[in-house]
Image (tube, rainbow, N blue to C red):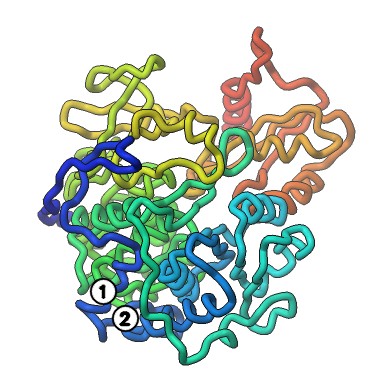
């Protein structure tokens, strides 16, 4: 397996967020999301910026369209600090909207296209969005106009009758001057599911986005010759930062795949001479299953990053046999860390595959016990993370911010260890969560939804092992009245995004097992499920 040298830019200790946090920062850095585009335009004006299906935009083209969109939104009345929500799939317009909002000093709120009406309504109301740009095909999911009086503009594509048309707004007029922003200002709000069942809006700052983009660039030796292929959702932190803003930072080419299917991904990777991508391990496994994988021309592919779950040893060995120059690199982070906090050093995956790599240059990671005291190297505790890429907190949620951030550290809720060489191991979840193909699903959110069904007396969500996705959602339910698995699936599918809907059920009229303290014994339920699967 290939490798390359990593050279980190110079750093210094700085104080930020009203002198409440001190951490290492890169000295020479862009100062805003908009500055990433300015720099790319200056260094690679005719280089290909975006590719999606038949569309190809140079950085000059991209800058012009961003200017036109920003001017159109400004003429409508959008101002600095306004929240602009995006209910968009992987398409060029997602990037245009992100950068147009940045030019106006507005805040982008990307939302998964899998979200259903109740969750979408909550997010739009909670962040007080003034505009929603959405897929025409999702018009039926968008909350009614009278339920969100503050949502002044709805913009869509292809003649959606309930919204303004995206492209009819554009004229030749361009907004060239960007609104002034501070590094610590919020650039993006990403809603992440919480243990209370209500999503929390993590406030990604310009400072954090820039530092994470530099972490990816330096840690993977990316430059303007690189071609990144986005197969994960751009509305999630990995797609947004690891691909959109990182390729912008290096002035490289971003190829956007609307929907991941392994054959289409491999054809596009070959066609566009992809050099870099980041996916969940399940996607790599699906690529390996393609009968023509070993015959495809993927010689340009040099960095294969992944996260969300360990890469099976068999997959690493299979990738190495077919693509010996490919460097596989595990990354670990979260929405609250603006993506990566750790990264596998190049070439070290075969030797340290049971870890998620080492802390990045500007990341400070410590492992603490229940009293918030650091534990010895190799001992298990909760992982806390600090750095310029850690968000300031949650939008309009001071209680959650105070609970989850201490002295500049974010309390990840992940149980793990830090060894003497600085490698981080993730051992367990302190929070009750499962991971379905890279989608993090908090069990309580699904359980709260099931409890709304009149036939459900009690319920518990546990992970069902899956060789492709890692885990699937399984529900143990004690019924007070008759209900079928099909009925419960339909009930959940109108209230939850698709990946959160239980795919299998254990239905009974008997109470679920509880311990002496009355707590549901999920461990026992998992064991029961495994026995059923193995019988």
Dividing the picture into quadrants, the one containing residue 477 is top right
Q: Position of residue 476 (x, y in %)?
A: 70, 31
Q: Crowdedness of circle 1 by 10 Å Cα count: few (<14), some, many (20+)? A: many
Residue 367 appears in view = yes
Residue 263 appears in view = no
Q: Is residue 115 left or right of residue 506?
A: left
Asked whether the beta carbons under mark 2 and mark 1 sit within 8 Å of each other, the answer is: yes
Report the disc number at residue 40.
1
Residue drawn at x 65%, y 17% as measured from the top left: 519
What whole-number distance in Å separates the C-alpha atoms at marks 2 and 1? Answer: 7 Å
Q: Position of residue 490 (x, y in %)?
A: 77, 51
Q: Nearer the viewer, residue 354 or 211?
A: 211
Q: Position of residue 196 (x, y in %)?
A: 61, 34
Residue drawn at x 51%, y 30% as measured from the top left: 431
Where does the C terminus fall, quadrant-wise? Answer: top right
Give the SS element for disc 2.
Answer: helix
Q: Nearer the viewer, residue 472 or 107?
A: 107
Residue identifier under label 2: 59
Residue drawn at x 37%, y 60% as measured from the top left: 181
Q: Nearer the viewer, residue 385 or 186?
A: 186
Instruction: Establish if 153 lies above or below 443.
Output: below
Report the disc number at residue 301.
none
């Amino acid at each position: 397996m290939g490798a390359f040298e990593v050279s980190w830019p110079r750093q210094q200790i700085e104080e930020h967020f009203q002198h409440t946090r001190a951490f290492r920062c890169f000295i020479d850095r862009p100062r805003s999301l908009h500055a990433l585009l300015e720099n790319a335009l200056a260094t690679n004006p005719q280089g290909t910026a975006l590719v999606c299906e038949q569309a190809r935009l140079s950085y000059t083209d991209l800058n012009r369209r961003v200017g036109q969109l920003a001017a159109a939104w400004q003429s409508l009345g959008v101002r600095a600090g306004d929240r602009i929500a995006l209910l968009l799939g992987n398409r060029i317009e997602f990037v245009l909207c992100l950068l147009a909002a940045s030019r106006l000093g507005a805040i982008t709120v990307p939302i998964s296209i899998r979200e259903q009406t109740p969750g979408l309504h909550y997010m739009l109301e909670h962040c007080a969005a003034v505009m929603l740009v959405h897929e025409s095909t999702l018009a039926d999911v968008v909350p009614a106009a009278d339920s969100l009086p503050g949502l002044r503009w709805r913009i869509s594509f292809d003649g959606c009758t309930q919204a303004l048309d995206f492209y009819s707004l554009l004229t030749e007029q361009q907004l060239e001057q960007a609104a002034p922003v501070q590094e610590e200002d919020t650039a993006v709000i990403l809603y992440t599911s919480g243990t209370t069942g209500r999503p929390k809006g993590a406030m990604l700052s310009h400072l954090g986005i820039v530092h994470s983009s530099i972490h990816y660039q330096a840690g993977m030796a990316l430059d303007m010759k690189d071609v990144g292929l986005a197969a994960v959702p751009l509305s999630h932190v990995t797609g947004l930062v690891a691909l959109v803003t990182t390729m912008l930072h290096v002035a490289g080419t971003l190829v956007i795949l609307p929907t991941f299917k392994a054959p289409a991904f491999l054809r596009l990777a070959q066609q566009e001479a992809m050099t870099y991508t980041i996916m969940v391990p399940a996607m790599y496994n699906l690529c390996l299953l393609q009968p023509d994988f070993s015959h495809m021309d993927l010689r340009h592919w040099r960095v294969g990053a992944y996260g969300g779950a360990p890469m099976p040893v068999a997959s690493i060995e299979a990738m190495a046999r077919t693509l010996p120059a490919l460097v596989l690199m595990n990354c670990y982070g979260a929405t609250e860390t603006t993506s990566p906090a750790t990264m596998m050093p190049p070439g070290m995956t075969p030797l340290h595959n049971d870890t998620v790599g080492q802390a990045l240059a500007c990341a400070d990671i410590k492992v603490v016990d229940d009293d918030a005291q650091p534990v010895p190297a190799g001992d298990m505790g909760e992982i806390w993370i600090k750095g310029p890429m850690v968000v300031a907190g949650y939008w309009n949620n001071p209680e959650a911010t105070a609970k989850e951030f201490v002295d500049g550290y974010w309390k990840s809720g992940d149980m793990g260890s830090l060894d003497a060489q600085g490698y981080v191991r993730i051992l367990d979840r302190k929070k009750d969560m499962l991971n379905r193909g890279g989608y993090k699903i908090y069990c309580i959110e699904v359980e709260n939804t099931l409890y709304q069904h009149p036939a459900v007396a009690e319920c518990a969500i546990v992970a069902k092992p899956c060789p492709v996705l890692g885990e699937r959602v399984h529900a143990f339910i004690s019924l007070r009245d008759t209900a079928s698995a099909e009925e419960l699936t339909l009930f959940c599918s109108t209230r939850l995004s698709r990946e959160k809907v239980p795919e299998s059920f254990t239905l009974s009229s008997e109470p679920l097992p509880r311990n002496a303290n009355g707590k549901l014994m999920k461990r026992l339920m998992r064991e029961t499920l495994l026995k059923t699967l193995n019988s």
